[in-house]
Amino acid sequence: MKVGPRYKICKRLGNSVFDKCQTQKFTLSESRSKQTMGKGKRRRPLSDFGRQLLEKQRLRYTYGITERQLSRYVEESTSKTETNPGITLLKKLELRLDNVMYRSGLASTRRLARQIVSHGHITVNGKRVTVPSYKVKSGDTFEIREKSKSSALFGDLSERLKDYSMPSWIAFDAKTAKGTISRDPEYTASDVAVDLGQVLEFYSR
């Protein structure tokens, strides 16, 4: 997925969409922009459609997926009799292989995680997978390919994971470079930086 200037996108959608924007430099830049805006014209309040579009874009950029991919995930999440289609949607995004690489600490950003998967460094249940959108499930095992363990991408993995807080639904052993999806991700609305209800409303038009 092609992405434009990240700082510009973060100023519009929030700093949670890119790791690059979660820095002191961006915070200072954003603060200066707000001060400058306060001296001039104020932004008009967003319409319902504007808020829905904003949340949809925020979710899409956060996970680095295309419009077509997100549309398909929403359709799959709402086509069944789910008690909470928003949480179902989030689980589908979280169980993408590239996201699992990011959540497990094997990659510092989702963009790098996609590269790691697409370059064939990861196997799932013993088979090499090169599709970032590959869906893993509870009980699946993943590991760094034997030939890739010496790559600079994973050279300091043990050191990086020492203080890393891994999600409870992922178990990863840095010594063996092998991990397991212990269960499905569990979330509540307060855990999500995106208003999933607005996203669903956008696609229900």
Image (cartoon, helix red, strand yellow):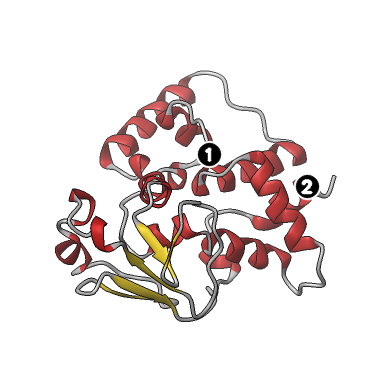
Front one among 129 and 56: 129
Q: In this orientation, does residue 139 appear? A: yes
> Which residue sits at x=33%, y=36%?
26
Q: Residue at x 49, y 51 (%)?
A: 132
Residue at the image point whose x is 34% and y is 45% from the top: 22
Residue lying at 26% horizontally and 67% vertically, measured from the top left: 164
In the shown orientation, is residue 143 left or right of residue 43? left
The quadrant holding residue 187 is bottom right
* Quarter of the figure with residue 195: bottom right
Q: Is residue 90 above or below residue 2?
A: below
**Residue type of the residue flagged with mark 1:** Leu
Residue 38 location (% of width, % of height): 48, 26
Rendered-image quadrant of the C terminus? top right
Mark 2 or 1, nearer chain start: 1
Q: Is residue 9 above or below residue 142?
A: above
| Residue 203 circle label | 2
Q: Secondary structure at mark 1?
A: helix
Where residue 86 appears, x then y in whole percent?
68, 63
What residue sits right under mark 1 in the picture? Answer: 13
